[in-house]
Image (tube, grey):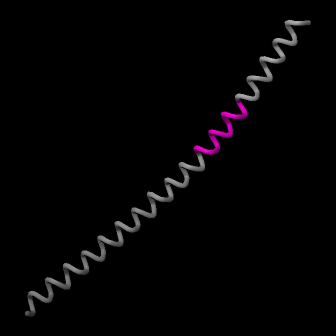
């Protein structure tokens, strides 16, 4: 009987640890999703900046050729 109680306590401990690990995993997944969104936003900003610089260079070239 004592062995069964010990096994039951060990199983309960394992179950509790699994629950904590699952919570940690959920938190990591949420953080990863947030990081992916941040990377996408940064990429859009870089793309916008690149287009703006292209337009600026074209305008400067046009100004230099007509000036």
The image shows residue 31, relative to residue 25, as above or below, that is below
Tell me residue 49's x, y (percent).
32, 71
Task: Name which quarter of the figure residue 66 lies in.
Answer: bottom left
Task: Name which quarter of the figure residue 25 lies in.
Answer: top right
State the residue at coordinates (41%, 62%): 42
Would residue 62 appear left or right of 5 to someone viewing this image? left
The image shows residue 18, relative to residue 1, as above or below, that is below
Quadrant of the frame with the C terminus: bottom left
How many numbered discs, if any? 0
Quadrant of the frame with the N terminus: top right
- Region of the chain picked out in magenta, as a range: 18-28
Tell me residue 47's x, y (percent).
35, 68
State the residue at coordinates (19%, 78%): 57
The prevailing secondary structure element of the residues shown in magenta is helix
Tell me residue 48's x, y (percent).
36, 72
Residue 11 in magenta stretch: no
State the residue at coordinates (30%, 77%): 52
State the residue at coordinates (45%, 64%): 41
Residue 24 in magenta stretch: yes
Tell me residue 44's x, y (percent).
41, 67
């Amino acid at each position: 009987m004592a062995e069964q109680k010990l096994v039951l306590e060990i199983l309960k401990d394992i179950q509790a640890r699994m629950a904590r690990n699952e919570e940690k995993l959920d938190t990591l997944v949420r953080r990863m999703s947030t990081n992916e969104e941040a990377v996408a936003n940064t990429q859009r900003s870089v793309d916008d900046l690149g287009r703006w610089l292209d337009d600026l260079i074209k305008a400067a070239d046009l100004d230099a050729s007509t000036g």
